Image: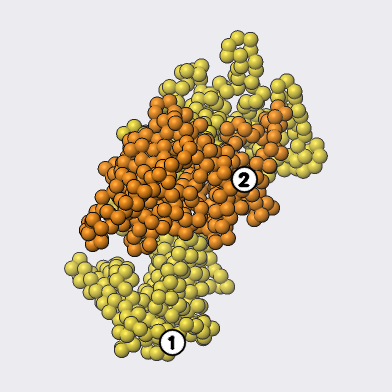
Chain colours: A yellow, B orange
Amino acid sequence: MAAETDTRNRNPLVRDDASGTGLVAAGAVGLSALLFVVSLAVLFQAVDLTDAVAGVPVVTLLGGGLVVLGAATVAFGVGSRLGFVETEPQASAGMLAGVVFAATWVVVAGLVASQTLGLGTAGWLVASLAVGGGVFALSVGTREDVGSTVPAGALAAMAGLVFLAGIIGPEWVWDLGFEQKASFTGGFTVPTVTLFCSLVAGWASAKAYGGFGARGRHTGAYTLVYLNAGSIVGVLFLLLAFTVFKGISGLVNGFAVGLGAGPESTIVLLGQSISWEWPFYLPFVMNGVGLTNDFNGVLPAIVGTVWLVVGAVLFAVPLGVGAAVFLTEYAERGRFTQAVEVATNGLWSTPSIVFGLFGFAFLIPRFGNGKSLLSGMLTLGFMLLPLVVITSREAMLSVPDEYRDASAALGVTKWQTIRSVVLPAALPGVVTGIILGVGRIAGETAPILLTMAGGVFVPGSQTPDVIGGFAFTSTPPFVENPVLLDAASALPYQLYALITAGVGASGNVANPDEFKWATALVLLVVVLSFYAIGIAARYYFRRELNQ
Amino acid sequence: MSETTQTPTESQQNTTTTGEPETTAGETEEQVREEWRDYQFAGEAKLSVEDLDVYYGDDHALKGVSMDIPENSVTALIGPSGCGKSTFLRCLNRMNDRVKSARIDGSVELDGEEIYQEGVNLVELRKRVGMVFQSPNPFPKSIAENISYGPRKHGDIETGLLARLLGRSNEDERDELVERCLRDAALWDEVSDRLDDNALGLSGGQQQRLCIARCLSVDPEVILMDEPASALDPIATAKIEDLIDDLSEHYTVVIVTHNMQQAARISDQTAVFLTGGELVEYDDTEKIFEQPESQRVEEYISGKFG
Ligand SMILES: Nc1ncnc2c1ncn2[C@@H]1O[C@H](COP(=O)(O)OP(=O)(O)OP(=O)(O)O)[C@@H](O)[C@H]1O
Ligand SMILES: [Mg+2]
């Protein structure tokens, strides 16, 4: 006891981590990470609870794992308290841990009392509060090694026993008795509870592994952060993998490699035509839908999406960056700039369907009264504009004033300074804004629905050829491009149309479901490629700036 | 000229030391005398400042400063931190115009021409009156680009694709300029093999010398330096001091420094500002350091206050 109150008490500088007891704690941390991953897999139905691994159902494995984890955690904590394990615990696990444990146990005790034991309202209230208070006193009032391990370990062990005993199993359903049909199923409850228990016990055993004290708290927090980050990456990966898995077969349908395998492409530039043959054939991205096609694809929608994004960026970026230059470098700070700031922030949060409606009601009547690629580009451009303004402004504001002063002191004019010093320094930030914005607009469906149309199955002849569409005329405005004023399709809309068309509309497509997933995959790839281009651009500009 | 004024000021000093017992108490404000600030020199004034007042909002940072700065010489400005030396310096090329809250009253003439009047071409003014800032501020560009930036923007040097197409590219001239400026700033030997590296990768002292080189690149007439040697080691400082010495043959140098020895070594005349934004004494450097008129200046120089 005296050692605890002595603030000058020093712990050894070097600790021997390879001790047997340390291994127990490390094993517990590993086990909780494993349980965490497995329960995530169950939650996303990558693994089923009734699946058997080495003859044992997954639910039993989870239960057993939790029991072992809980027992190891408690054993380590108690062992440390009794002096079998050398650790450096503080006097208490702390208020935060106490509150979290107490809240958890209040819920557990309440559920057990009301559901299992069938006590009335007063009964379960008293039971849960008593248990919660006890746990709070235990975790706050005892030394850190007991206070942070026993409530966590007991929780995990108890959950494990419940699963092992089959009280909660795959078939288990708890009807909540709401007006709507709502229930907790075993398929949801088991992995969720395991997830939570593995987090709590993993944290506690990581603390134990660190030997409690400041170092233990550090390892505990670290473990939580890593499990968290890992699960986020895992979920993202799962999503991607799911789409790839479902879409890949439709995408590679009819794939062929070899000279002359692919179709011939021609680009007409200023009267010169350049043509080449693709050395491979990937019909899904090289064809439209047609009766004479050997394989069908979504080429028109891909090209439409690309042109849509290019058009929107060409429209929004110069305007947005120009506005940001004016706002940061020229306009006096005051009411006006504040009003513009509020307006741009508001515009960025405006729902896309509202932008779509604007395009439908305002742009379409002005461009020949028909849905057109140009209206789509401008509508998405308007959507992109506020984000470009916001991020460019932010980026320019973060360029240090010293650069501007240095340039001014050399007698360089303001505009030249902006062009040669401020904008290059702000470029990475501007590009980040464009990346984020493009990520949003490239997958946008609602505005396209209202301004560009397209169809469920689009024939290859509707592939927009924007470059080839340019033609010179002898009357003002001397250049015209009918392609821009034609209706066009884009991937998000085509996907939407495919989903809502249902099973009936099959067109000439052999397997509509495969077609749908392949479209989703292509959309994902197109959006991610824009993203990759943006990241590469940002990387390039950053390196220019500080090699 | 300066000899003739020496006698009356000397007698003034006697009255100061004997006639004002409060000053020795240290607490009472010593009155600033007009004569202490009246520095007479032969020849033309390059810069002549009259009754300069600067306010930052309600903060009166410079109070009625008047001083003439002779051509082709080194003028040192010394004084405790926060007394307005940088503020004064920034007034000389109107960099203070860039501070929103600053208000400037008074007159500054460059070669007899008022710079605080309507229609002054700030680009031309700042080309003629260059500045090195208190903290190094190179651009996030390559070392060579930092130097050639000013001349390129002024159209004195043209490089790049368009200039090459038009046959007007003078890259040789640029390379010469870069080398000359870097040599003058005593930086060439350290960076000659990495001119295309980013300037932000240089050490603080190297960055400061790069800023000096950059200032020289537009060939100014007056060079304002705000503690250019504060981040430098003794060797680089000595180089910079030599450079300032050389520069003073053709340029008018105004330098702020906290280093008394440095002021004494390199400057021809010294102006002492004291807390409150007042110019207290301005005279030949020797005079200031050996026989200052003001009690407070003497205390400041001998390290008793400030
Ligand atoms: N941009 C500004 N806005 C408001 N007040 C300022 C500004 N610049 C300087 N001041 C104030 O003016 C006074 C003089 O500052 P100045 O920078 O000229 O001092 P200094 O003599 O250069 O000091 P140092 O030796 O520390 O560099 C200080 O009180 C300072 O707070
Ligand atoms: Mg200063």
| Vertical arrangement, residue B240 with respect to residue B101, above or below | below
Q: Which residue is mark 1?
A: A86
Co-location on one chain, circles 1 and 2? no
Q: Secondary structure at mark 2?
A: helix
Q: Is residue B102 visible?
A: no
Give the camera-side residue of A519 and B165. B165
Quarter holding residue A353: top left
The image shows residue B222 at horizontal and vertical percentages of: 51, 40
In the rendered view of the protein, which quadrant contains the C terminus of chain B?
bottom left
**At 41% across and 78% down in the image, what residue appears?**
A212
**At 40% across and 84% down in the image, what residue appears?**
A10
In this view, the residue farthest toward the right is: A259
Dot 2 surroundings within 10 Å: few (below 14), some, or many (20 or more)?
Answer: many
Q: Chain of mark 2?
A: B
Cα separation between marks 1 and 2: 66 Å
Q: Amino acid at mark 1?
A: Glu
| Vertical arrangement, residue B12 with respect to residue A508, above or below | below
Q: Chain of mark 1?
A: A
Quarter holding residue A187: bottom left
**At 32% across and 80% down in the image, what residue appears?**
A91
In the rendered view of the protein, which quadrant contains the N terminus of chain B?
top left
Q: Which residue is mark 2?
A: B181
